[in-house]
Image: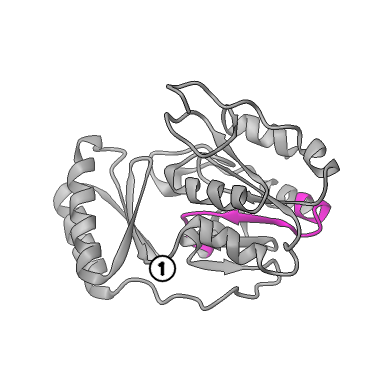
Amino acid sequence: MDGMSRPPQPPSLSALVRDGPIALFLDFDGTLVELAATPDAILVPRDMRAKLRSLSQEMDGRLALVSGRSIADLETHLGHLDIAAAGSHGADCRLASGRALGQIPQGISAEARASLYRFAQNEGLDLETKSHGAALHFRKHPEKERAAYQFASALAEQHGLAVKTGKCVVELVERGADKGAAVDAFMDDPMFAGAAPWFIGDDITDEDGFKACQDRGGGGILVGEREETRAGHALADVTAVRQWLGI
């Protein structure tokens, strides 16, 4: 993207569907719900799960949430998920039936978690523990971004993990876990195969999803603005995303 110019708005969802079957991959925080000071403080509309399920049914099941949160965490906010979902940046991919795609990873070691906990306590950061990783949130202390990234990078090297960065967060996950890999896992399943995939997301970690969808004949839709993005289209904010989806 040149400077801060925004890519054009995407065609309407109905227009995309008219051109042939599509699959939708949706980030959660910052895309379907507004960001909050802490991960637990988000406000989720009561009818969101029902609306997502209805949209998934309209698309013959070719819709998946792809989030940095674990699937269990998503369910604390949405209730039991009866749509496809990928949690922990694609480390855990499941179809609407609950069937896992690939092996469910074991997550990071207790030693690595303990090191993160001590660092978070010492620096006054929020630590979010997940089934397949852990995240340091520095939204309350943006001046700690560099220290958090350096510590996480050193810990990742020590334990054979990968670092993911996002809006006021740095996260440790298993290597190979990214949203592009999640798209590939779903698209290789018969339910999704043959459709043009489209990914909607707001954060840096969503760029892998944009690329994977473009490589398979679909596209990416950025939420908000970013100086550089692989997304060919953009929507202004969460409200615009919900309007575009009709939810």
Q: Position of residue 202 (x, y in %)?
A: 50, 39
Q: Position of residue 26 (x, y in %)?
A: 61, 48
Q: Position of residue 52 (x, y in %)?
A: 71, 50
Query: Position of 140 compared to 72: left or right?
Result: left
Q: Can residue 4 be seen? A: yes
Please check the rendered image and state whether residue 152 is part of the magenta-colored stretch, yes or no. no
Write the residue at 81% across / 36% down.
15
Q: Position of residue 22 (x, y in %)?
A: 75, 50
- Residue at which label 1 appears: 132
Instruction: Specify start and end residues of the magenta stretch as a single range.
Output: 55-71
The answer to whether residue 5 is above or below residue 182 is: above
Q: Residue furthest left?
A: 122
Number of residues whose C-alpha sits closer than 10 Å to that of mark 1, classed few (under 14), some (14–19) or many (20 or more) = many
Q: Nearer the viewer, residue 82 or 195?
A: 195
Write the residue at 59% across / 31% down.
234
Query: Position of 208 compared to 85: left or right?
Result: left
Q: Nearer the viewer, residue 182 or 213?
A: 213
